[in-house]
Image: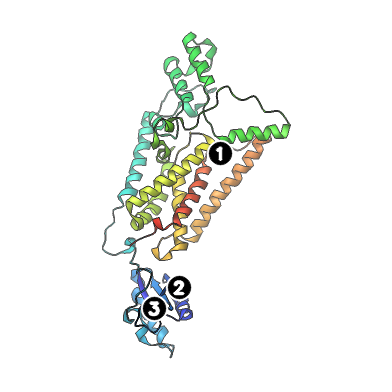
């Protein structure tokens, strides 16, 4: 990224910028205060025109030369390469490392996360139970692998008691728990008396149904479900690790393609350590919001992907000279995708409150929305600005 022209004639800078953009040359205009004591414009505003891509600099200089020659009021000496040095209050910006020629970038963090997610999916598939499950039993919890049990946002005591019953008496015992031996019945009763947090969504549906039917609320449970059971026991990695788990190959592929496209841009500009802190913050925030909404059974990197998309959008608006690449149509597609899921979720909620069948929603859209909001917020902070 280079300064093409510096001038106090802001209107002419804007005209040249329009001319360059018409030639498909990416450029950016900003302003600074002239602090050179020897300048006749000391204390005044100066406008600078930057060329984003290094490959466009030569062509841009030719256009600038023609532009200056067409006006009698300007001379060739105003070309940026010939302009007298001026001290600005704002620091000079160098080209982002992603577009520097001859410099090899390795993207250790981005590639490492992709490899880790792939290995975790492989380990999950190899360790999941393959035993047939009776049709009358809800399979969502008893089919999770040991990998998922260790890395899901929570794995409460309610689920662990169910695991113990299955290990001792098999899946068939859950179909006819009254035929269990005395120790098994005690375990099953303990399982029923130990509720698990399944999110606020189900409670909202029940409250809506009670309001519509004008029925009194049921008495409170003898034992209220606990929040953050494993996290409160010190397993803090669970705040982040659900983002590393995926349901199948296509789920992994979709999320990792987004990470490859977005993560490499961010790692090149803010470095691996700040990118890692960005991922930890947005993963923890989006995962926690999803847990509070729907309970602990969710997984996928898409919440962080949404955070990256909205982060890049924020940087494009706040600091376009950083050179992030995200076309408007892609951003608006993601925005429409998230908004569409919010709409479908709202329709499903209304149908459930009315007691009508609703479409099953297996997408953790709370994580998408929370990730997008957190990414945009971080994108407005100077802490994640490119520092050259």
Which residue appears farthest toward the right when viewing the image?
A: 214
Callout 2 touching callout 1 (CB < 8 Å): no
User: What x and y, as percent, mark residue 243?
Assistant: 42, 41
Camera-near label (1 vs 3) is 3
Name above or below for residue 372 compared with residue 100.
above
Q: Residue placed at 46% from the left, 57% from the top?
A: 380
Q: What element carries label 2?
A: helix
Query: Which quarter of the figure is the C terminus placed in?
Result: bottom left
What is the distance, in whole Å, between disc 2 and disc 1 at their CAs? 44 Å
Q: Which of marks 1 and 3 is nearer the N terminus?
A: 3
User: What x and y, as percent, mark residue 356?
Assistant: 67, 34
User: What x and y, as percent, mark residue 186?
Assistant: 50, 13
Camera-near label (3 vs 2) is 3
Name above or below for residue 183 compared with residue 76.
above
- Of residue 297 and residue 276, the one placed in the foreground of this image is 276
User: What x and y, as percent, mark residue 295?
Assistant: 51, 34
Q: Residue placed at 44% from the left, 23% from the top?
A: 160
Q: Mark 2 points at which residue?
A: 21
Q: Residue placed at 48% from the left, 50% from the top?
A: 374
Which residue appears farthest toward the top when viewing the image?
A: 182
Q: Earlier in the sequence, mark 2 or mark 1?
A: 2
Q: What element carries label 3?
A: strand
What is the distance, in whole Å, between disc 1 and disc 3 at their CAs? 55 Å
Q: Is mark 1 on a helix, strand or loop?
A: loop
In the picture provided, is 32 more to the left or to the right than 333? left
Query: Which label number is shown at residue 6?
Result: 3
Q: Name the residue under label 1.
A: 361
Q: How crowded is mark 1: few (under 14 residues within 10 Å), some or many (20 or more)?
A: few
Query: Which quarter of the figure is the N terminus placed in?
Result: bottom left
- Of residue 221 and residue 291, the one placed in the foreground of this image is 221
User: Can residue 156 be seen?
Assistant: yes
């Amino acid at each position: 990224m280079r300064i093409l022209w510096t001038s106090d004639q802001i209107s002419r800078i804007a005209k040249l910028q329009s001319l360059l953009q018409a030639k498909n040359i990416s450029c950016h205009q900003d302003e600074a205060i002239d602090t050179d004591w020897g300048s006749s414009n000391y204390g005044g505003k100066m406008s600078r025109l930057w060329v984003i891509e290094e490959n466009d600099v030569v062509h841009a200089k030719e256009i600038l030369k023609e532009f200056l020659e067409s006006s009698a009021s300007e001379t060739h000496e105003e070309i940026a390469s010939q302009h007298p040095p001026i001290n600005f209050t704002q620091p000079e910006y160098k080209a982002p490392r992603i577009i520097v020629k001859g410099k090899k970038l390795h993207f250790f963090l981005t590639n490492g996360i992709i490899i880790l997610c792939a290995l975790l999916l492989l380990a999950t598939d190899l360790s999941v139970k393959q035993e047939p499950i009776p049709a009358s039993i809800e399979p969502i919890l008893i089919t999770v692998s040991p990998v998922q049990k260790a890395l899901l946002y929570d794995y409460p005591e309610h689920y662990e008691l169910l695991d113990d019953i299955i290990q001792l008496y098999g899946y068939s015992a859950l179909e006819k728990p009254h035929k269990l031996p005395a120790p098994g019945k005690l375990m099953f009763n303990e399982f029923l008396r130990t509720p698990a947090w399944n999110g606020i969504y189900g409670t909202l549906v029940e409250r809506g149904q009670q309001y519509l039917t004008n029925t009194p609320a049921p008495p409170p449970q003898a034992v209220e479900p606990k929040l953050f059971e494993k996290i409160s026991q010190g397993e803090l990695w669970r705040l982040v690790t659900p983002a590393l788990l995926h349901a199948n190959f296509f789920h992994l592929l979709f999320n990792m393609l987004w990470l490859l496209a977005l993560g490499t841009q961010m790692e090149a500009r803010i470095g691996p350590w700040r990118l890692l802190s960005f991922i930890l913050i947005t993963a923890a925030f989006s995962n926690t919001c999803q847990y509070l909404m729907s309970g602990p059974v969710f997984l996928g990197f898409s919440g962080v992907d949404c955070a990256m998309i909205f982060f890049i959008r924020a940087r494009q608006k706040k600091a376009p000279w950083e050179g992030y690449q995200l076309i408007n149509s892609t951003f608006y597609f993601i925005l429409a995708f998230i908004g569409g899921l919010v709409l479908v979720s709202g329709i499903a909620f209304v149908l459930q409150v009315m007691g009508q069948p609703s479409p099953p929603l297996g997408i953790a859209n709370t994580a998408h929305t929370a990730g997008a909001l957190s990414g945009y917020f971080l994108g407005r902070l100077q802490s994640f600005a490119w520092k050259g």
